[in-house]
């Protein structure tokens, strides 16, 4: 008998930022690191003889939970990858829903029939993943094997083994990050013993971000939305400093127009359906030669603050600057803006320096970005 543990990857950027992440190879999150550590303790005393992984970073990183206490190579197999979603790769959920609502509904609720030009079908994923699974089982008779892979890939495997429809989300729910399925393989047949076992995760590491609204964005010319831009900047200033003393809208508006002139995707308006929710201003010229990107303004309307939504705007900046090959993102935060400092620190920013400011000193903060071509774990 061969034992096989099939594990979904830790929380990755796409999960947190609400981006589609089939083959898009983003980074893991601070919560994902903690989930990896909890998973490693789960497997510390379980004998493991072989370790396989999807070749995507989030799955390979998850596999290091096993290598912490077991001296094993990570054997990567592209057949264990997540579904390739073609034109939706790295696209925010809400933008995909807005542009192609029927296709997105099929992607979520009618996996048996989902089909989109440039994308794999669930049946394509099922065929390649099952081929890999049988091959791994046959190569490891009588051994204990761990496989780290992805949510849809696991759904495709389990529905096939159980002989049920891909649409049966009651029997095979969306796995938690690091959720485990336990399989046994005897005489050419698989048995599914457990599904979505996450007993190793404390409640704070089980939280999902699906309870927050998903925002879509539109890239705009700030000259057409001057009133909106200046109103957002004024509100951000007041929220940070408590009043508008010293605030002048004109220089910030002129700078935004220059950012747009340099890069037509640098100014984004954010919406929940039709309701305006925020604004993101990226200065893609600043830091170009030094290898970092600059966030000039990350703004949420008051009714959207404190709900875990701001990270979606940060996700746009991360995706943009990583696509430009930048190694880091920088910004200024007023030293007395406690809420902003908590947010940025929680999302991987560190202080580089302290600079003079009109109301309070400004902290120059930086978040490192993993390159999509960086194979290091």
Image: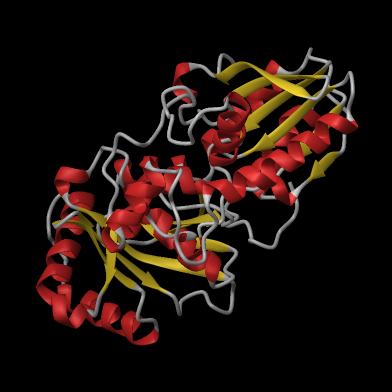
Seen at 87% across and 21% down, the residue is 143
- Quarter containing the N terminus: top right
Image quadrant of residue 12? Answer: top right
Is 254 placed above or below 275 here?
A: below
Q: Position of residue 362 (x, y in %)?
A: 37, 57
Taking the image as drawn, is residue 363 in sight? Answer: no
The answer to whether 295 appears left or right of 101 in the picture is: right
Taking the image as drawn, is residue 58 in sight? Answer: yes
Seen at 75% across and 22% down, the residue is 189
The answer to whether 170 appears left or right of 230 in the picture is: right
Q: Position of residue 124 (x, y in %)?
A: 60, 51
| Residue nearest the viewer, comparing 257 with 180 | 180
| Residue nearest the viewer, comparing 26 with 112 | 112
Is 319 placed above or below 81 here?
A: below
Numbered disc total: 0
| Residue nearest the viewer, comparing 260 with 95 | 95
The answer to whether 171 appears left or right of 254 in the picture is: right
Q: Position of residue 103 (x, y in %)?
A: 35, 56
Q: Position of residue 307 (x, y in %)?
A: 26, 37
| Residue nearest the viewer, comparing 73 with 126 | 126
Image quadrant of residue 325? Answer: bottom right
Way the structure is coloured: secondary structure
The answer to whether 22 appears left or right of 79 in the picture is: left
Seen at 30% across and 41% down, the residue is 339
Seen at 83% across and 42% down, the residue is 75
């Amino acid at each position: 008998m061969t034992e096989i543990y099939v594990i979904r990857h830790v929380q990755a950027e796409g999960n947190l930022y609400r981006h589609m992440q089939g083959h898009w190879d983003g980074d893991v999150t601070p919560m994902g690191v903690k989930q990896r550590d909890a998973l490693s303790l789960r497997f510390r005393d379980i004998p493991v003889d072989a370790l396989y992984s999807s070749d995507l970073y989030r799955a390979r990183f998850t596999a290091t939970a096993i290598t912490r206490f077991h001296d094993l190579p990570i054997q990567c197999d592209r057949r264990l990858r997540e579904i390739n979603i073609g034109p939706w790769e790295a696209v925010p959920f809400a933008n995909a829903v807005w542009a192609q609502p029927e296709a997105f509904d099929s992607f979520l609720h009618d996996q048996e029939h989902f089909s989109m030009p440039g994308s794999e079908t669930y049946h394509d994923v099922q065929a390649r993943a099952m081929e890999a699974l049988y091959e791994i089982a046959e190569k490891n008779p009588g051994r204990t094997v761990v496989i780290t892979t992805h949510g849809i890939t696991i759904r495709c495997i389990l529905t096939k083994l159980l002989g049920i429809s891909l649409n049966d989300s009651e029997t095979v729910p969306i796995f938690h990050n690091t959720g485990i399925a336990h399989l046994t393989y005897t005489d050419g047949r698989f048995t599914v013993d457990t599904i979505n076992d996450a007993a190793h995760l404390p409640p704070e590491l089980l939280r999902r971000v699906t309870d927050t609204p998903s925002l879509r964005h539109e890239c705009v010319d700030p000259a057409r939305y001057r009133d909106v831009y200046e109103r957002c900047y004024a509100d951000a200033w007041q929220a940070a400093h408590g009043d508008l003393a010293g605030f002048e809208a004109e220089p910030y508006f002129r700078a935004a127009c220059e950012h747009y002139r340099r890069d037509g995707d640098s100014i984004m308006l954010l919406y929940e359906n039709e309701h305006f929710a925020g604004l993101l201003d990226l200065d893609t010229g600043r830091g170009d030669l030094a290898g970092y990107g600059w966030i000039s303004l990350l703004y949420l309307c008051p009714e959207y603050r404190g709900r875990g939504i701001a990270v979606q705007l940060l996700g746009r900046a991360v995706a943009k600057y990583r696509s430009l090959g930048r190694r880091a993102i920088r910004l200024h935060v007023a030293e007395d803006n406690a809420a902003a400092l908590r947010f940025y620190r929680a999302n991987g920013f560190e202080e580089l320096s302290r600079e003079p400011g009109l109301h309070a000193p400004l902290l120059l903060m930086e978040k490192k970005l993993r390159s999509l071509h960086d194979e290091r774990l």
